[in-house]
Amino acid sequence: MTEQSNWEHYLLNDDDVADFIIKGYLILDTGSGQEVNRSILERLNSLDSNPGDKIIEAAPQLSEIYDHPRVRGALSSLLGHDYSMNEHRHCHRNPSGSRSQIWHQDSLDISSLHPRHDKHVHQLLMMYYPQDVNKLNGPTALIPGTHLLSNQARDRTASQGNFKYQVIAEVPAGHVLILHYDIWHAGTANSSGNIRYMIKFLFDRVSESTIPSWKHDPSKSFGITTKLDAQPTMGLQRSLGDRIRINRREMWNNLSGSRVAIEDYYDRFTGAWPTVPT
């Protein structure tokens, strides 16, 4: 079996999925050869204008990124094995001298986009970088966990506490960020003297889960539910902690097609009263 057809080998495991639910993002090394990244970068530099949704036609080697088994395994784990690529995609060209973006969620102005949903994964955003990304050339900044608040009022979410725990995604060429579509993020300033490219892809859930689509071990359910509850909401308002915890459980339930992570799942105080010695 070739690596290209062996995407099931790269399915996520329970802890990977739980980490994605908690943080809202996954950093993945596609394993694409550097000659592929260099070729894509050369093609992007040769373009006269931004092709928008036609970026794949303009740079056909991008198929070696989004079709790589490591990418397919991760997307299948989070969206189901029948996921599809959305018709919308874009080449983001960040020239040297650019300023940082404001914190934002990506728009819902395109008809093929799903409504925001802080308890499920209907759509994933993937950012591919054909060149190394460092602190000088405009890495993407993320606020972990904010996808779990996507149905909060925008002004409340935009003013979340401090961002001591924000993530600056400095990654080598060939890496991708796989993001819950609703996560708050921003492109940072580019002072490197070079252009920084990022190609944005969107992927859609086609059908609802009836069983986990990743490498699931039922014996770990107790530990995973505990992990979803116990992981602190770093940098987000403490008053929203209960809502975040509930949304983590609901997202796990929706992804796994079960109700295993329910409130009384591991409540040791349920059931008959213990016998009191006399």
Image (spheres, rainbow, N blue to C red):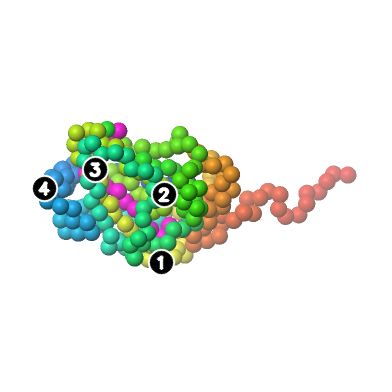
Q: Secondary structure at mark 2?
A: loop
Q: Which element is circle 4 on? A: helix
Residue, disc 1: 207
Task: Tell me, yes or no, whether the highlighted magenta stretch contains residue 124.
Answer: yes
Q: Position of residue 262 (x, y in %)?
A: 59, 56
In the rendered image, the quadrant that contains the N terminus is bottom left
Q: Which residue is mark 2?
A: 183
**Sequence-wise, which precedes: disc 4 or disc 3?**
4
Q: Nearer the viewer, mark 1 or mark 2?
A: 2
**Label 4 crowd (10 A; few <14 / some 14-19 / many >=20):** few
Closer to the chain start, of discs 1 and 4, is 4
Give the amino acid type for the residue marked by disc 4 in the picture.
Ser
Whether residue 207 is visible? yes
Q: Mark 2 or mark 1, which is nearer the start of the sequence? A: 2
Q: Are marks 4 and 2 in contact (CB under 8 Å)?
A: no
In this rendering, the label closer to the viewer, 3 or 1: 3
Q: Is residue 65 magenta?
A: no
**Predominant secondary structure, magenta span:** loop
Badge 3 is on which residue?
A: 94
Q: Give the image location of residue 106, x and y in percent.
A: 36, 53
Q: Position of residue 152 (x, y in %)?
A: 50, 53
| Camera sees residue 39 | no
Question: From the viewer's perspective, is residue 259 above or below residue 102?
Answer: below
Disc 3 to disc 1, C-alpha distance: 35 Å
